[in-house]
Structures are given as C-alpha cells and as structure tokens.
Amino acid sequence: MASKASKGSTFLLATMSVASAHGSARVSPTPEIEAKFQAFESLFKKAYSTPEIRSYRMEVFAESLRVAALRTGAALHGVTKFSDLTEEEFSDKYLSGYQRRKPSHPTAALPVEEMGGAPVPIDWRTKGVVTPVKDQGHCGSCWAFSVVEQVESQALQQKLLPHGSTLSVQQMVDCDDFSHGCAGGSPETAYDYLTIGGGITTAAKYGNYIGNATEKCHFSKASAVITAPAYPAYKSISRGKSGEAAMYAKIASTPMAICVQADLWKSYKGGIISSADGCGGQDPDALNHCVQVVGVGEDAETKSPYWIVRNSWGADFGNDGYVYLATGGNVCGIAMEASVAVGLAGV
C-alpha cells in the first residue's frame, strides 16, 4: 500500500496534469494573493498535506480569483470555499449528481389565466415549511436533497409532519435502487421510490446524513412517516424555458424541486444572478445540479423580482446557503425541470 506522502504526491501530479491538459491558466501568486490565501485557509479551515500541494492550491486559488473578476454581472463573485478547486474538480465533486431522464409523465397543464404575469413576492421560509440548509458534501446526492426537501416542505404545509421535522436524505441515497446514490440520480426516480419503496422516514429515525454511498439500506416500511400511495408521485410544472410562467403561478401555493446549470456558482458570494452573468442552462443536457426554489423576492432598490433558491452546499455558501436568480430569463435553466410531489399521505 502506498504511503500517505506518496499518495499526496500522486494526487498533486494528477491534478496538475489535469489542469495542464485543460489549458488552465497558471497565475503566479503575489504577496497580495498569499495574504488572501492565508485568510481563505483560516476562514474555511483548509489544511494541505505537503508544501507542494499547498503551493499548487494557491495557484488554483489565484486562477479562481482571476476568473471571478471577469464575471461582471450584478451578482457578487469572489473567494468561496471552492476557490482552491479547479473547474474540473468542482464539477466532479459538486455537479455530478444529476442524471437527466426523459419525462415519463406529462407536464401539468395549468389554465391559461394562471400563466404569465409578474411573479408575486412570497417567501416560504417565513411560513415554517422550509427546514435549515444542509450540506451534501462530496456526495453526488443533489437529486435526493431536491426531492426530499420538496416532499418535506409539502408535508409540513399539509400538516403531515410535526413542525421542525426533517425527512431522511440518507434513506433516499441508500435505498433508491433506481438511482445511484452518491454517483447520481434523478428527481423522477426519487419520486418513484416514494411509491415503490414504501415511503420515507425522518432523519431522526433513519440516522443523520453522512453522504456515504456504501451504506446499506436499513429502512423499514413500518418506520415510514410519509408515503405516496398513488403513482406517479410527482407532477412536472415546467420542462422548458417557456414554463417559467407556470412556475410563477405554482410558487404562490408551494415551493418546487428544480434542476439547474450551476457551473457559475463556484465563485458566487451573493446578490442576484441574471442573464448578464452568463449562467447558461438553456440546453437541458447542460443541467447538472438539483435544488429547491422556495420563493420569490424583490430587490430593495430596483424592485426586480428574483427566485429564492435553497442549495445543498451548506450555510456558508452564497446568501446563507441560498442563491438568488433573476426571474424571466430562465437564468441557470431554472425552468427546465420544475416539479412538485402529489398524493402525499401521513402515517
């Protein structure tokens, strides 16, 4: 077995080779970069196993700052906890969880009078149906967080769960055989699991989230607190850029599970991401991350509306764990896959 030192050296060479292969710019650290990197290490409790790896990570950090400075939209970009990762590493660690499937059920048809118009501000966080932001870690489980948190919100709305209860994301990761745990999955299969698998229990009953794909499923149907007896257990609200109008109507009655293109979020610190930021997402095949939209806010100065999106990268990301996306332009592909649960029942 290789020693820790040799493993570290191998890792360093591998990451440097990847950076070189992708043509990543190498930015020589200056005293200013050194000072910022030290502050970054302290803030995010970073520690590197060798001086060589630290030196390389500082070069990656400098490149991340250079790229962030080029992003000149209204949103704030800069140093984040991901700044010592290359774009490729960030994608592998945090944007590898969504595996798109062709829809097997029709998109919900809303009456014409319920579509269009400006979105009305609403924040479901203030109504007791949005639990605290969580952190998926290096597990590609965004698909599970997106659906479990959506089911959780709707169950709290319908008073099927006691206030403060959280459903088990770890159960979904361990037990949904239609998806691949930390190797990825889709919201559609997660909803299907609720029906076929016999429901879902609380994090308190199943065990806290650990983000480990090797855990064996130990869910018992007798422990379920929420079930979805009817199939399918979800309804698509939008599956294309023109569907954002349907989302305006739906957000008035419930949050929604969504999938987006989140490459730009690596450097996101706050503010409202708009079309001018170049977030992408207009191609459904470019979607790579699933989250939950929990409301519509309004900018205090411009009065422009924006989507309030709950992420699963911890409360030290973005706006206390949230991302704000401008409405109306399918920013980051927010309207490409929006859904809600249907037919939920308490046990």
Image: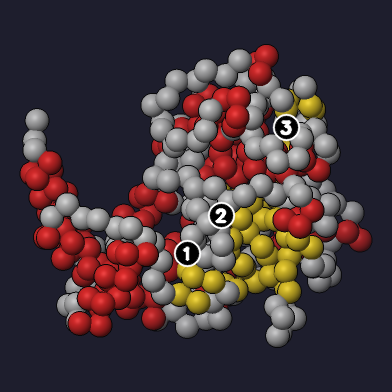
Q: Mark 2 and mark 3: span between their CA atoms?
A: 23 Å
Q: Secondary structure at mark 1?
A: helix
Q: Mark 1 and mark 3: span between their CA atoms?
A: 30 Å
Compare residues 167 and 231 and report the one nearer the observer. Answer: 167
Q: Position of residue 275 (x, y in %)?
A: 58, 75
Looking at this rendering, what residue extends furthest in the bottom direction?
301
Q: Secondary structure at mark 3?
A: loop
The mark found on residue 265 in the picture is 1
> Of circles 2 and 3, which is in front?
2
Sequence order check, earlier mark of 2 and 3:
3
The mark found on residue 311 in the picture is 2
Report the amino acid beneath label 1: Trp
Looking at this rendering, what residue extends furthest in the front direction?
42
Q: Secondary structure at mark 2?
A: loop
Side of 18 relative to 124 (left or right): left
Judging from the image, the colouring scheme is: secondary structure
The mark found on residue 233 in the picture is 3
Residue shown at 42% from the left, 51% from the top: 94
Report the amino acid beneath label 3: Ala
The mark found on residue 48 in the picture is none
Sequence order check, earlier mark of 1 and 3:
3
Q: Is residue 196 visible?
A: no
On screen, 149 above or below 179?
below
Q: Residues within 10 Å of mark 3 (few under 14, many from 20)?
A: many
Q: Position of residue 189 (x, y in %)?
A: 59, 33
